[in-house]
Amino acid sequence: MSRNSVWAVAAMATTMVMGGCASLITGGDLVREGEPTGFLEVQNVSRTNRLDVVLISACDVGSYGLNRLPSGQSIPPGGRYRWTVSSGCWDVGAGEVLSGTSWTEGYTKVTVNTGRTTIIQSR
């Protein structure tokens, strides 16, 4: 591939990310402008394991995106965390990092109703 071709591909990739494909990386906005909202709550029902990562994306995004917990925060055993999200279908993943190269995880699809709290229990 020529140097000009490499630059053209890089420019096109940057344009795609900046122009809307960024939701594929991030998982998209949790609250979409002008849409009604509800709440999505993840409860850690484990007695021993924490949840280090929670991934949330709209069902039509095509990727689970990035961790939605604040940096350095986890959900301890018996704990919970709540997000405000637009009403509708959401893909949710949660897990614990066991080491630098291993983890446990689980995924589900949920529907959040306007003004209501949808609870997901993770083990």
Image (tube, rainbow, N blue to C red):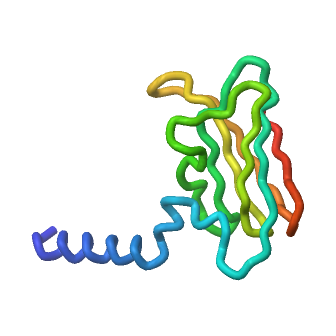
107 vs 111, left or right, is left
- Furthest-bottom residue in view? 34
Q: Pinpoint residue 92: horizontal percent, then vertical percent.
A: 70, 51
Q: Is residue 13 at least partly visible in the picture? A: yes
Q: Quadrant of residue 15?
A: bottom left
* Number of numbered discs visible in the structure rendering: 0
User: Which of the 4 image quarters holds residue 88?
Assistant: bottom right
Q: Position of residue 42 (x, y in %)?
A: 76, 43
Quarter occupied by the N terminus: bottom left
Compared to 42, does 18 lie above or below?
Answer: below
- From this view, report whether residue 94 is shown above or below residue 49: below
For the C terminus, the image quarter is: top right
Q: Residue at x 81, y 29 (%)?
A: 45
Report the residue at 56% width, 45% height from top: 70
Residue 123 seen: no
Image location of residue 54, percent across then percent down: 64, 44
46 relative to 4 in the view: left or right: right
User: Residue pushed farthest left?
Assistant: 3
Q: Is residue 72 left or right of residue 44?
A: left
Q: Quadrant of residue 117?
A: bottom right
